[in-house]
């Protein structure tokens, strides 16, 4: 079993730097520090970064505990091509970075991995006048390739405020804190069949009295999904 402990502003990367600590419970001896991830946004080749990486603001761990994804922000010294990113790590005999997903001007709201870590989904609730967008990636052994993007239907839906994948990565639920101008919120469910992602169902926040939207109930603020995708 593993636990992620995201530690903001630890100083590992300098100003606004951070680290991710992974703890493992081996032979039921209690959770002990297994690995520390940090320092990844200070320098990379000839591109010098300021160290303001915001590394570890969001963390996702696969069900088998062997793949970890975390967000970061690359803030270059000359302010050219500043961008958000996701870095994915995998454990074999040691933890190594296997891929990056670079997202220029893409503020990540949430991210999730399926059971084996080969499907990654990430969201930005502010895209396109806050309609929101969720991108789904599949790992091909070298890179995570964009498979599909799902956008909210209306302005300010904020679809993708929270997201969750099922175990095999062919079903996803997306929470949005608004629905057609109301803060009642919504949850949308999509499923992949034969390589195509299709809309399945929409759930909305209702009142106890007349099933009309409740102002500011923000249904869908946090969502989750069972491994088999049925709950």
Image: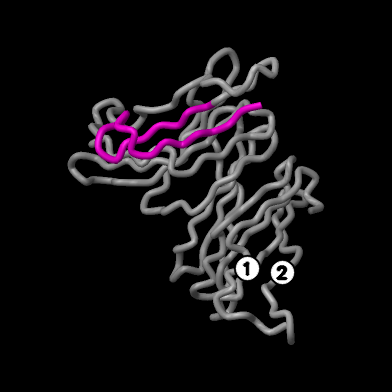
Q: Residues within 10 Å of mark 1 (few under 14, many from 20)?
A: many
* Picture quadrant where residue 13 is located: top left
Q: Is label 2 in a helix, a strand or a loop?
A: strand
Q: Position of residue 140 (x, y in %)?
A: 61, 32
Q: Is residue 69 magenta?
A: no
Q: Circle 2 is placed at which residue position?
A: 203
| Front residue of 52 and 169 | 52
Q: Position of residue 41 (x, y in %)?
A: 33, 33
Outermost residue toward the front? 30
**Residue drawn at (69%, 80%), measured in percent from left and top?**
207
Name the image colouring. Answer: one colour
Outermost residue toward the top? 93
Q: Position of residue 104 (x, y in %)?
A: 37, 49
| Front residue of 100 and 53 | 53
Part of the protein shown in magenta: 1-22
Q: Is label 1 in a helix, a strand or a loop?
A: loop
Q: Are marks 2 and 1 in contact (CB under 8 Å)?
A: yes
Check the image and report above or below for 50 versus 27: below
Q: Is residue 2 magenta?
A: yes
| Front residue of 134 and 27 | 27
Tell me if 32 is positioned left or right of 198 in this view.
left
Tell me if 5 is positioned left or right of 27 in this view.
left
- As drawn, the label of residue 219 is 1
* Picture quadrant where residue 40 is located: top left
Outermost residue toward the left? 78
**Residue drawn at (27%, 35%), measured in percent from left and top?**
51
**Residue drawn at (80%, 45%), measured in percent from left and top?**
228
Check the image and report above or below for 70 versus 134: above
- As drawn, the label of residue 157 is none
Q: CA distance from mark 2 to mark 1?
A: 9 Å
In which quadrant will I find the N terminus?
Answer: top right
């Amino acid at each position: 079993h593993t636990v992620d402990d995201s530690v903001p502003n630890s100083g590992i990367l300098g100003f606004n730097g951070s680290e991710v600590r992974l703890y493992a419970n081996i032979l039921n001896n209690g959770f002990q520090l297994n690995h520390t991830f940090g320092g990844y946004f200070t320098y990379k080749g000839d591109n010098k970064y300021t160290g303001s990486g915001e590394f570890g603001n969001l963390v996702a761990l696969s069900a088998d505990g062997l793949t970890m994804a975390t967000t970061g922000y690359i803030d270059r010294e000359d302010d050219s091509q500043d961008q958000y990113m996701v870095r994915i790590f995998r454990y074999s005999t040691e933890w190594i970075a296997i891929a990056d997903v670079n997202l220029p001007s893409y503020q990540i709201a949430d991210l999730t991995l399926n059971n084996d870590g080969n499907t990654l989904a990430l969201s930005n609730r502010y895209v396109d006048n806050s309609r929101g967008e969720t991108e789904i990636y599949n790992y091909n052994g070298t890179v995570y390739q964009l498979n599909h993007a799902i956008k909210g239907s209306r302005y300010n839906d904020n679809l993708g405020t929270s997201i969750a994948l099922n175990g095999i990565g062919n079903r996803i639920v997306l929470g949005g804190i608004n629905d057609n101008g109301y803060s009642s919120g919504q949850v949308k469910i999509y499923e992949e069949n034969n390589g195509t992602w299709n809309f399945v169902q929409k759930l909305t926040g209702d009142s106890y009295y007349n099933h009309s939207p409740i102002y500011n109930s923000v249904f869908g603020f946090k969502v989750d999904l069972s491994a088999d995708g049925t709950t």
